[in-house]
Amino acid sequence: MEKTDFTLPIELKQHTPILHFQHEQDGAGLRATELKPKLDRLLHQIMDVPDKWLVGGGHNGIKALDYKLKIRCTKVKDYVVASSIPRFVREEFQRTGVDFISGAPYFADNEPIKNKKLDDARRGRMMDNIQLEFFSFHIPLVEKIKEWLPVLLAYENFGLRQSKGFGGFFPNDSSINDFETALKKHPTFNGVKSNQPIALHYQVRGDFKSAFKKIDEEYKILKSGLAKEPSQMEEYFDEQCAIDWEKPTIKRELVKGRGEPRQPEYIKDTKVKYIRALLGVAELYEFPRDNKEKIMIKSNNIERFRSPITFKVFNETIYLIWRKIPPEIYDTTFTFTNRRGKSISINTPPQYPYKDDPKKEFSLEDFLLNHVDSKWNELKK
């Protein structure tokens, strides 16, 4: 596209693969139908948008802005993506030339891969020559897009599993200073005082596969724990709030023995709480060592809750960004059901859970700054 006052061509670099529902389609990449609503929402956040810039019905209550966006790119490579790929499958992939990412922070589709049903497995796509073409008759709007698009791309990912680092893009030929400057400018951080942390960052060696392994490891340690590393959420709530996390109760009541709960309701229990929900609600928990038991999770009040932690990847640097947890996730009831149809109910922690300071709200920032790997460094406003 030739640059005029009404146009804005921008070339992007893709930093991590993007996951899509329709991964088998040629157009399963960065899409204008996702990028434009996010950019519209950001522009509404940072200014009172003039009525003459508005058009159409908008998306999710956000009125659309009067500009056109086209995206052109070249497909580079598709990867089979899973958190765990057995060794014998990896060896076969290597023999047959199938590109894959194992150890990724993506916890679905493992069964199709183990059973070699690759048509049912999710794929991540990398692209090159990504050209954005903006057009609007409102010249000041074009200037706003030029100013704020890098801010959006520094803060947001695209496609599926956005919070785990998939679908990361940024303007081509940008430096890490450009990225950090854009991130700090996001309106989410307007209330943060100067020289206060807004994110954490970690340096890895290698490509996005190395970054994904670190993201997967760090997130598991924070939320659920690993074989040799206990859940940091479990330790934090035990020490700071005298609250036990839910896993032992779920296992005792729904997995062990006959899976017949002795106590079906823990709603009023002040000791046991569904702690992991504060870092994102899962659809199910699996207990592979206990007859591969699967526990379904449901709430009448919360349909979806995105993790308040987002990982961004820029070249060889991972950024961990946290958002404020919405109040509706606190002290709400979740039902856990096993394959026999037996259930128990457990509430999430209260918004003010601290045993020594009942007026203090749960601080995700305090938790993260004190419980991530010590090699993560603070990025300050």
Image (spheres, rainbow, N blue to C red):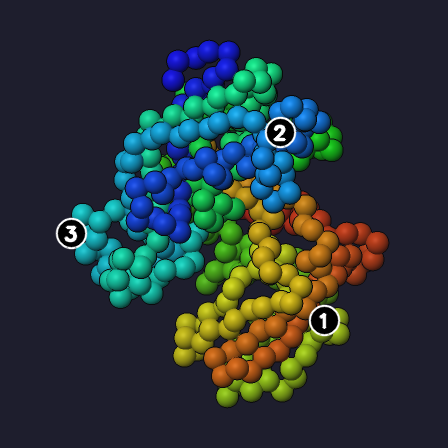
- For image coordinates 47% across by 17% down, the residue present is 7
82 up-or-down from 369: above or below: below
The mark tally for this picture is 3
Q: Is residue 173 above or below residue 26?
A: above
Q: Is residue 115 above or below residue 311?
A: below
Examine the rendering and report whether any part of residue 27 can be seen. yes
Alpha-carbon span between mark 1 and mark 2:
51 Å
Q: Residue 327: x, y in percent?
A: 73, 54
In which quarter of the view is residue 230 placed?
Answer: bottom right
The type of residue carrying mark 3 is Arg
Q: Which residue is mark 3?
A: 95
In primary-sequence order, the first of circles 1 and 2 is 2
Which sits in the foreground, 286 or 125? 125
Please name the residue shown 71% across and 73% down the image.
267
User: Along the horizontal axis of the image, is 373 left or right of 352?
Assistant: left
Q: Which residue is mark 2?
A: 54
Seen from the viewer's position, the closer of residues 10 and 51 is 51
In the visual, does 207 lie left or right of 287?
Answer: left
Residue 201 coordinates in the image, percent (x, y):
53, 36
Residue at position x 68%, y 58% in the image: 329
Q: Which residue is mark 1?
A: 271
Three-letter amino acid code at the position of disc 1: Lys
Q: Position of residue 368 (x, y in %)?
A: 62, 47
Split into 4 quadrants, where in the image is the N terminus? top left
Among the two numbered marks 2 and 3 on one chain, the one whose residue lies closer to the N terminus:
2
Q: Nearer the viewer, residue 75 or 186?
A: 75
